[in-house]
Amino acid sequence: MQDGATSHTSISTKEYLKKKCNVLKKWPPNSPDLNPIEHLWGIMDKKISDETPKTKNQLIKKCRQVWNNIEWEIIENLCNSMEKRLRLVIELKGECINGFLLI
């Protein structure tokens, strides 16, 4: 799945994928992100950026601390919300589901 990351949108990446990966030709342009890990990364990003680590080692330490302290209930809720996410995507005919409270 491609997102807006520079590594996904560079000309060389697009050309390579155009030649090697037929599935992307029919990928909807507004495909919602249904992957629960992306939401978990968002939670981690918020908690990590609250403190703004100043060095690489501080960042690594903070990432590990945040990861190890994520409540299991959050992970379960993200996984359990998949059915709602899928139903909403179908209901919206593939449109973006950002902004909908699904957990």
Image: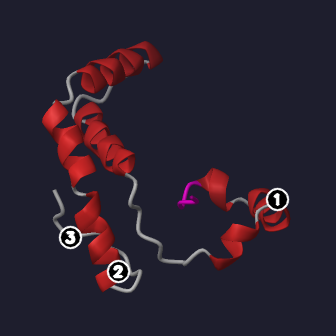
The crowd level at tag 1 (other Cα within 10 Å; few <14, some 14-19, many 20+) is few
**Going 76% across and 69% down the picture, which residue do you hit?**
22
Question: What amino acid is at disc 1?
Answer: Tyr
Query: Up-down: is 42 above or below 47?
Result: below
- Pinpoint residue 30: horizontal percent, then vertical percent: 47, 77
Question: What amino acid is at disc 3?
Answer: Phe
* Whole-number angstrom distance, CA of label 3 to CA of label 2: 14 Å
The crowd level at tag 3 (other Cα within 10 Å; few <14, some 14-19, many 20+) is few
Label 3 or label 2, whichever lies nearer to me, is 2
**Going 41% across and 80% down the picture, which residue do you hit?**
94
Q: Quadrant of residue 28?
A: bottom right
Secondary structure under badge 2? helix
Q: Quadrant of residue 82?
A: bottom left
Residue highlighted by disc 1: 16
Residue highlighted by disc 3: 100
Question: What amino acid is at disc 2?
Answer: Ile
In reply to whether residue 2 is colored magenta, the answer given is yes
Considering only order in the chain, which callout, 1 or 3, is on the residue closer to the N terminus? 1
* Quadrant (top left/top right/bottom left/bottom right) for the C terminus: bottom left
- Pinpoint residue 41: horizontal percent, then vertical percent: 35, 42
Q: Nearer the viewer, residue 8 or 92?
A: 92
Query: Up-down: is 46 above or below 6?
Result: above
